[in-house]
Image (cartoon, rainbow, N blue to C red):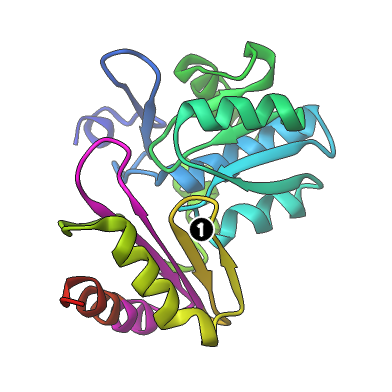
């Protein structure tokens, strides 16, 4: 509301300890963390062509597509700063981003910086001469569920059960963190929370109808007793 009232180009919020940053566009709409990862990666690849970008495995298909369209190499990584910083060092990655709006920069030895993310956004807006909504919304190419949390007695056993249920029809399976299973027109990731006794589901599809159908289906599978 304040952004719209004031006519600001965007709004920015930093979390309490300064390692996360979120943005809203000029209409006050929040920009998802994975779309921000794609935006910042595209900007950084202008300075570091061909660089490796890491994106957490809850991220949209859009992220890989946009990084590759910008001439970079995209690679999925586990959730959590310790995992990402190690993988950045090992692969000499130029940038990494998480759905939770942690953004990691090579020039800061793999550390997060909300300030640098904000400066990149300002630079992008100055060059593009467009409203922020006109820049980020075209990157939202698929229908996303957002993160959905479930309380389950044994997350590890439930992940195994889900994997067995979907493995036969899968196009691709990654067990990097929980399990991410991809199909022709949708994918999902289920993983145990690092901080709470929860199973977290992220799901994306090529249509809203398919996304809603698969959320209902996965909710039933996760909630049912073995």
Against 111, is 167 above or below?
below
In front: 101, or 24?
101
**Mark 1 Cα shell of 10 Å, populated few (<14), some (14-19), many (≥20):** many
**Can you say which quadrant of the picture contains the C terminus?**
bottom left
> Label 1, on which residue?
60
Question: For this view, does 97 lie left or right of residue 114?
Answer: right
Based on the displayed image, in which of its 4 quarters is residue 110 positioned? top right
**Residue 72 image offset from top left, x and y in percent:** 78, 44
Residue at 80% x, 29% y: name it: 48
Image coords of residue 36 (percent x, y): 50, 41
Q: Nearer the viewer, residue 188 or 51?
A: 188
- For label 1, the SS is loop
Task: Decide if residue 26 is in sight here.
Answer: yes
Residue at image point 36% right, 39% down: 26
Who's the residue at 52% across and 43% down the image?
78
Specify the quadrant of the image occupied by residue 151. bottom left
Along the line of sight, the residue nearer the viewer: 124 or 64? 64
Tell me if residue 44 is in the magenta stretch. Answer: no
Q: Is residue 145 visible?
A: no
Could you say where residue 116 lies in the image, as x and y percent from the top left? Answer: 54, 17
Residue 114 position, x and y percent, is 45, 19
What span is in magenta?
186-214
Q: Say which residue appears at 17% left-offset and 72% top-offset.
A: 223
């Amino acid at each position: 509301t304040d952004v719209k009232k004031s006519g600001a180009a965007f709004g920015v919020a930093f979390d309490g300890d300064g390692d996360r940053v979120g943005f809203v566009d000029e209409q006050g709409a929040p920009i998802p963390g994975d779309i921000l990862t794609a935006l910042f990666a595209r900007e950084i690849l202008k300075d570091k062509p061909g660089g490796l970008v890491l994106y957490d495995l809850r991220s949209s298909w859009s992220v890989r597509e946009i990084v590759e369209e910008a001439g970079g190499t995209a690679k999925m990584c586990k959730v959590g700063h310790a995992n990402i910083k190690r993988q950045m060092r090992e692969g000499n990655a130029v940038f990494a981003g998480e759905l939770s709006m942690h953004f990691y920069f090579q020039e800061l030895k793999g550390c997060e910086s909300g300030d640098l993310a904000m400066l990149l956004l300002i630079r992008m807006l100055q060059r593009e001469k467009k409203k922020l909504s006109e820049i980020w919304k075209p990157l939202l190419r698929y229908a996303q569920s957002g993160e959905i949390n479930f309380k389950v007695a044994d997350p590890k056993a439930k992940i195994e059960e889900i994997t067995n249920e979907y493995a036969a029809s899968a196009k691709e399976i990654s067990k990097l963190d929980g399990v991410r299973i991809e199909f022709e027109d949708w994918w999902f990731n289920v993983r145990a929370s690092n901080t709470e006794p929860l199973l977290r589901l992220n799901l994306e599809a090529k249509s809203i109808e398919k996304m809603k159908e698969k959320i209902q289906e996965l909710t039933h599978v996760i909630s049912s007793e073995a």
